[in-house]
Amino acid sequence: MKQLLLTLALIGFASTANAACYADYKAKMDNPLRLHYGVIELPDSACSVGAAASNIARRLTGGWELLEVMSVFDESGLESRRNRAGQYYLRY
């Protein structure tokens, strides 16, 4: 019985440890001013709004500057954000 409980606990821990983490954000580029909304996949170590901000800022390229991390979520929130993010859906 103890072995069964331990096995179930380890399976539960493994499934939560592998849960994907995503964030939605707003970014801008100057001259001329352009804005975009995007969705990005994050490493587990950056799965909070604060940690996501520095991670996203490092990964944006082409002159984009991070304005705001709106939220951090799991894969259940991806589909509802796909159309809004358009070409910036999981781009960076």
Image (cartoon, rainbow, N blue to C red):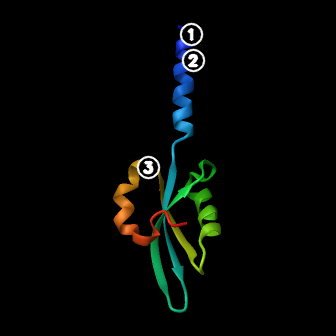
Q: State the separation of the CA atoms marked 1 and 3.
A: 33 Å
Q: State the separation of the CA atoms marked 3 and 2.
A: 27 Å
The residue shown at (65%, 68%) is: 58
Numbered marks: total: 3
Task: Give residue 90's position: percent from left, percent from top.
Answer: 48, 62
The residue shown at (46%, 49%) is: 74
Identify the amino acid type marked 1: Lys
Mark 3: few, some, or many residues within 10 Å (few <14, many ≥20)? Answer: few
Q: Quadrant of residue 51?
A: bottom right
Q: Which circle marks residue 75 in the picture?
A: 3
Task: Give residue 24's position: percent from left, percent from top.
Answer: 47, 62
Q: Mark 1 or mark 3, which has the lower sequence index?
A: 1
Locate the C terminus by quadrant. Answer: bottom right
Identify the amino acid type marked 3: Glu
The residue shown at (57%, 25%) is: 10
Q: Which circle marks residue 40 in the picture?
A: none
Q: State the separation of the CA atoms marked 2 and 1.
A: 6 Å
Contact between labelled residues 1 and 2, with CB atoms less than 8 Å apart: yes
Q: Mark 3 or mark 2, which has the lower sequence index?
A: 2
Disc 1 marks which residue?
Answer: 2
Disc 2 marks which residue?
Answer: 6
Secondary structure beneath disc 3? Answer: helix
Q: Is residue 83 above or below residue 65?
A: above
Task: Give residue 20's position: percent from left, percent from top.
Answer: 51, 47
Left/right placement of residue 51 relative to residue 81 reads right
